[in-house]
């Protein structure tokens, strides 16, 4: 008799671990949805560190941000780190793709200073030579994790122009996501943040706003964290702090 083998789906396995944990710890069933959180910060040449709040604040959230509701519980399985060149003057935020490395065909600014960081793409390399921390104050859930792990250079599609973000595949990893192990649970009632500490270097043109001839343009470079996983609706404060496996 022939044996039939089924390839396990990693996301299905993560969902099952999360559901089983909730049932075991609470004895309750919750609505669980797959979800991607999006956190953004505009880059600045005068800043070397950035702190991202994970929770909804309609008064200060950027237009494309997706954050966690305070009543919910989030099971983090994957992280992606990207940069996007947005035109913030026309309000067309959603018309600009995210890049997961400092593409020299896109980030072409040059302030004419002669140093490597005079070139926009080189300034942006500091994003991918930085460290990342995830905190549930005061506990560091992920500490000094190298952002180089999030660098992703997708293959260009046939006949693509230099400005296309490249070919993405069907898996999370083929879309620029890093699989995080062990998984981290983020409780909406806690004070949770993601911190990005840029590597030591020059940030002169990291914000963009100029073209290759050092002429001002209406664009701003924004760093984007994408946190992918599963959200349990109204499950905050149902279990203690937990890092799974």
Image (cartoon, helix red, strand yellow):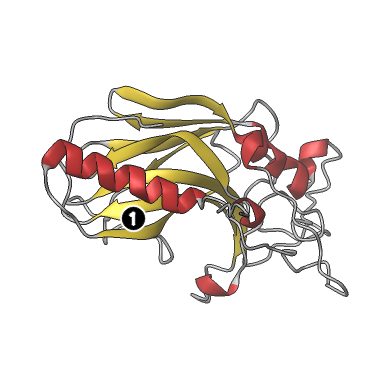
Residue under the point 81% across and 63% down = 156
Quarter of the figure with residue 242: top left
- Which residue is at the front of the view, 148 or 86? 148
Image height of 24 relative to 93, above or below: above
Asked which quadrant contains residue 142, the reply is top left
Q: Give residue 189's position: percent from left, percent from top.
A: 18, 41
Residue at point 72% right, 58% down? 210
* Quadrant of res 127: top right
Give the x, y percent position of residue 17.
Answer: 34, 42
Seen in the picture, residue 31 relative to 94 is either above or below; the reply is: above
Quadrant placement of the C terminus: top left
Give the secondary structure at mark 1.
loop
- Numbered-mark total: 1
Q: Is residue 143 visible?
A: yes
Nearer the observer, 25 or 152? 25
Camera-side residue of 140 and 124: 140
Q: Residue at (51%, 45%) from the top-left corner? A: 79
Answer with left or right where residue 123 lies relative to residue 157.
left
Out of 170 and 223, give the one closest to the viewer.
Answer: 170
Instruction: Mark 1: give few (<14), some (14-19) or many (20+) Cα within 10 Å.
Output: some
Q: Residue furthest front?
A: 1
Q: Residue most toward the left?
A: 27
Residue 57 rendering spot, x and y as whole percentages: 26, 56
In the figure, is residue 35 to the left or right of 55?
A: right
The residue under label 1 is 67
The residue lying at 75 percent from left, 56 percent from top is 154
């Amino acid at each position: 008799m022939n044996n039939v083998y089924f390839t396990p789906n990693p996301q299905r396995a993560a969902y099952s671990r999360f559901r089983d944990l909730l049932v075991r710890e609470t004895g309750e069933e919750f609505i669980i949805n797959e979800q991607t959180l999006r956190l953004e910060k505009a880059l600045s040449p005068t800043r070397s560190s950035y702190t991202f709040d994970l929770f909804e604040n309609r008064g200060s959230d950027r237009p494309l941000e997706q954050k966690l509701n305070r009543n919910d519980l989030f099971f983090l399985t994957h992280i992606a780190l990207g940069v996007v060149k947005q035109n913030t003057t026309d309000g067309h935020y959603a018309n600009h793709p995210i890049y997961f490395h400092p593409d020299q065909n896109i980030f072409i600014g040059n302030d004419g200073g002669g140093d490597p960081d005079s070139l926009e793409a080189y300034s942006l390399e500091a994003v991918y030579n930085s460290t990342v921390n995830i905190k549930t104050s005061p506990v560091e859930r992920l500490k000094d994790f190298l952002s180089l792990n999030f660098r992703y250079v997708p293959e260009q599609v046939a006949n693509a122009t230099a400005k296309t973000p490249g070919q993405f595949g069907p898996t999370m990893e083929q879309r620029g996501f890093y699989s995080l192990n062990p998984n981290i649970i983020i409780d909406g009632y806690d004070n949770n943040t993601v911190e990005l500490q840029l590597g030591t270097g020059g940030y002169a043109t990291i914000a963009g706003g100029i073209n290759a001839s050092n002429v001002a343009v209406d664009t701003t470079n924004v760093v984007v964290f994408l946190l992918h996983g599963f959200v349990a609706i109204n499950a905050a404060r149902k279990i203690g702090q937990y890092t799974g496996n």
